[in-house]
Image (spheres, rainbow, N blue to C red):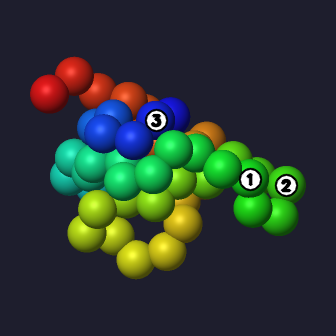
Amino acid sequence: MKKDDVVVFIIGNDKIKYKVIADEYELSGRKVVDLEGYSGEVATEYLKKVNV
């Protein structure tokens, strides 16, 4: 995932769209991204890129 992609969580009922604010990077062996308005890193395996 790249900066400015728009994503949603694929788990749970959260349908909020989040903007990726930094290209994905590795943390403790997992690919993660930072999301605008969301605290902490999120593993990319829990996200799906969507069209705006």
Residue occupying the point 22% across, 22% down: 51
**Pointer 3: residues within 10 angstroms few (<14), some, or many (20+)?**
some
Give, as a three-letter code, the residue at label 2: Gly
Return the mark for residue 29.
Answer: 2
Give, as a three-letter code, the residue at label 1: Glu
Residue occupying the point 83% across, 64% down: 28
Return the mark for residue 2.
Answer: 3
Residue 37, given in percent of the width and then of the height, sits at 25, 69
Quarter of image, res 27: bottom right
Residue 8, given in percent of the width and then of the height, sits at 33, 43
Residue occupying the point 22% across, 47% down: 17
30, 45: nearer the viewer:
30
49, 14: nearer the viewer:
49
| Sequence order check, earlier mark of 1 and 3 | 3
| Sequence order check, earlier mark of 2 and 3 | 3
Q: Kindly state the secondary structure of the residue where label 3 is placed.
A: loop
The reply to whether callout 2 and callout 1 are in contact (CB within 8 Å) is yes
Residue holding disc 1: 26
Q: CA distance from mark 1 to mark 3?
A: 13 Å
Q: Is residue 10 visible?
A: no
Image quarter (top left, top right, bottom left or bottom right) of the C terminus: top left
Q: Kindly state the secondary structure of the residue where label 1 is placed.
A: strand
Give, as a three-letter code, the residue at label 3: Lys
Q: CA distance from mark 2 to mark 3?
A: 18 Å
The reply to whether callout 2 and callout 3 are in contact (CB within 8 Å) is no
Above or below residue 41? Residue 9 is above
Residue 43, given in percent of the width and then of the height, sits at 60, 53
**Pointer 2: residues within 10 angstroms few (<14), some, or many (20+)?**
few
Left or right: where 41 falls relative to 39? right
**Pointer 1: residues within 10 angstroms few (<14), some, or many (20+)?**
few
Q: CA distance from mark 2 to mark 1?
A: 6 Å
Q: Nearer the viewer, mark 2 or mark 1?
A: 1
